[in-house]
Image (tube, rainbow, N blue to C red):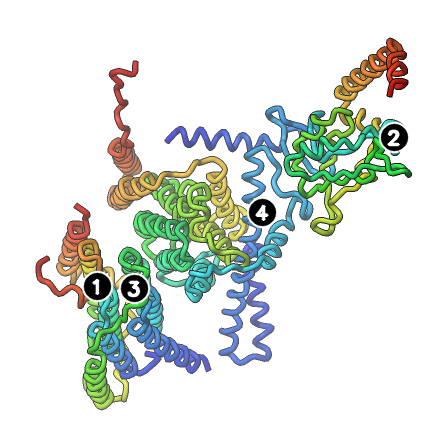
Amino acid sequence: MIFLDQIFVNSKKAILNLASAFLPTDAILIVSALISIGAIAAFGPFTMMYLTWFERKLVGRIQNRIGPNRVGIFGLLQPIADGIKMLTKEDIVPAGADKVVHFLAPVVVVIPALLVFSVVPFGRNMVAIDLNIGLLFFLAVSAMTTIAIFMGSWASRNKFSLLGGMRTVAQLVSYEVPMVLAAVPAILASGSLSTVDIVEAQGGWNGLKWFVFTPWGFVGFLMFYLCGVAECNRTPFDIPEAESEIVAGFHTEYSGMKFALWYMAEFMSVFTISALTATLYLGGYQGPWLPSWAWFMIKTYALVFVMMWFRGTLPRLRVDQMMGLAWKFLLPLTLINILVTGLWYFTSGLGLRLGLSIGILLVSSWVLVLFNRPYMPEKRVYEFAE
Amino acid sequence: MLPILAKLFIYGVLFLSLVAALGVVLLPNIFHAALCLVGTLLGIAALYLALQAEFIAVVQVLLYVGAVMTLVIFAIMLTHRIGDMTIPQTNKQSLPACLALFAFVVLIGGLLLKTDWSILVGTGGSVASVNPPVDTFMLGKALLGEYVFPFEVVSVILIAGLIGAIVVARKD
Amino acid sequence: MLIPLEHILIFSTLLFAIGVYGVLVRRNVVGILISIELILNSVNVNLIAFSRSNALDPVMGQVFAIFVITLAAVGATVGLAIVLALYRIKRTVYTDEINLLKW
Amino acid sequence: MFGVLRGMGITFKNFVASYFLPRKPNSLETGGMVTLQYPEERLPEKERFRNFPFLIYDTKPDDLRCVACDICAKECPPKCIYIVRDNDEQGRPLKKPKVFDIDFTVCMNCGICEEACPFDAIFMDHEFEVGGPERQQSLVYHMDQLLKPATHFAKIRPTDHVAIEEKRRKEAEKKRAAAQAQPKPPEAKPPQA
């Protein structure tokens, strides 16, 4: 099992030994970095392509239709067909747009999506860079997508994309705060910001001591995942690119390869958000029997499945509901969750711990739900109509 | 061979940041100026990474690029009128400002290059010896240990600023 | 320290000079606020450079840098709130058109 | 909150069940997989489905029912029918069109020509896969392309075919009866002219 577990790491070491025969030692460092970068640069777009296929098949099956199955055996070549279509489509730039920013926006949106891969621990010692501020790096880099999306919407000089841009900034900023706070319990429990340490901290009970099995971990997992869904503008929160209301939101004026870049950024952030949620709360690559990277892939793709399952089921939130949920429900609940994590670590005895934390969490979420009663105008009384 | 590459990279980043800073000041289109500022901030964050101050680099990207620049862009969007392109963006006092600042830079630059920084530390060597890099653990302990009072005062200022901004910008 | 201290200090002086030039020359209030951000950043560069070159207690340098960042954020928030209120009343953002103390 | 979970449960059941549902081609009733592999599997067209018109002839392409009365050309809203009456050797007009063109790029399949035609000569076809390399020339159908046998009509529209044959047979008998009833009056008039 160890052999299978470390298969990628050993293969990289083998390549390095091979290269060290004729390269000076400095060059070895560069070669090893290049191998990791190459792996990520290949894995990123590849997983994006097959996530689009996976999503179309899944949402199709939910709606009693089969989904793409004509290109290739089970429609497996459909992403390649989409890619070619995107490449050959004419790239229209609106006359009023300011060219530089219009061209720059898709590039700037893909950079953070790819940067985040460097921090994700794919398997035991299979992380590109083990930054000791890994998680913070992820949050900082995903904050840059707000600027990129806004550049795209402002530069295309189009009412709909400007509307989309305004909604995106409102949504991303207001969901970033609860996201950071939802990640804090995992940091408290593992005592370090580095993603690898967080996963190692969930290693007990031969790989099953995940944070999600503790009450605060479960709440933190739900919060982080919900904010993650909002961060990449996915279904219950896809107000910025709502096809029915504002044509296509911020990427209305993009076609051809630029639109493909927007699409790639969105799907890569779907993957990285699920990967991070799995790392933080579902014990990243920790698991009893299978090799570490297999566990990581199973958990991540399970979370991606749930995100796409949302897309097949849930209707879109109104803007005020979306903002209300972020500020009036998620934020207070994550703060209380941090309090409960602290309590969890400073009280001894399982019964007291469980009772206390579950009690606080249930009461607080019930009170918050009470406070957030949606405003229902009272029914109008028609004196003369009856 | 690696340190030379790293030096080249850092000097390149510094030069690009200066060019972006000039862009912030000189570009007529205010939105492009804001984007150049984002470029400068990222360049400075790269400089912090070179100085092994990772936490500050990440906080800078998270706070400045994530929050402050979003705010600035919102303000630009709400106050931008299409007619703004034609109005000259700089007032008449650019020449005196240039001269004064040039004198300032020459003065301070000369001062910087002349002083021998090793005096500060009292040890020999041309370059001041180096402190160990500060990792987030030490920073956290300091923020809540030795500097807990300024930490609380800053949070009070933040709340005051928040409420002040809401009251000022509210449309009553 | 990959690069000598002087070069970083010169870089921050230049940044400071550009920021001050921006404040003096720009007519658009948001432009002035952006230049102030530039000045604050140059101060931060100095702080971090000195905190690394043991002229300063390393932790103090970084703690001050954090405080500078947060206060710059507060400054920007309140400044932009004033700009919005100003724009709503006077419909203009240009400093030389705002020359009455009371209107 | 629990409404969301119930909704998710339904879609998940739907997703899992979709692998066990029978694949019925025309599965318009609920439950079956609705996907139809178009070129291979096709939904049978409804009888009254109408697409581009066609001219009908009984036995040979020459004795077509159309008498070039030009009513359908006048009635056609987008004016996409063009008829030229045929003349015999002495130049007298014949009851047959020499040229009968329909421009398929203009025709909007409304079926008004079919209703307007008093001689049941033009009907709407079921054949919709019509294409051409150029924009106009190949899509202006001439008479020879439009002519189709009555058997084709019977195949695609059985009930209409029976009704029309019934009507035509009754008319033929009425005309034959009228012809036998008063063969004399026409000879009486010519001597005075």
Disc 2 marks which residue? D63
Disc 1 marks which residue? C72
Residue under the point 32% across and 60% down: B82
State if disc 1 and disc 2 touch (CB < 8 Å): no
3D distance between C-alphas at marks 4 and 2 = 58 Å
Disc 4 marks which residue? A53
**Residue C100 rendering spot, x and y as whole percentages:** 10, 63
Horizontal side, residue A147 vs residue D49: left or right: left
**What residue type is disc 4 on?**
Trp
Disc 3 marks which residue? B84
Determine crowd level at label 1: few under 14, some 14-19, many 20+ residues with C-alpha closer than 10 A: some
3D distance between C-alphas at marks 2 and 3 = 78 Å
- Marks 2, 1: nearer the viewer: 2
Number of marks drawn? 4
For the residue pair B18 and B151, the one nearer the viewer reads as B18
Same chain, labels 2 and 3: no
3D distance between C-alphas at marks 4 and 1 = 46 Å
For the residue pair A23 and D81, the one nearer the viewer reads as D81
The reply to whether residue A142 is visible in this rendering is no
For the residue pair A224 and D183, the one nearer the viewer reads as D183
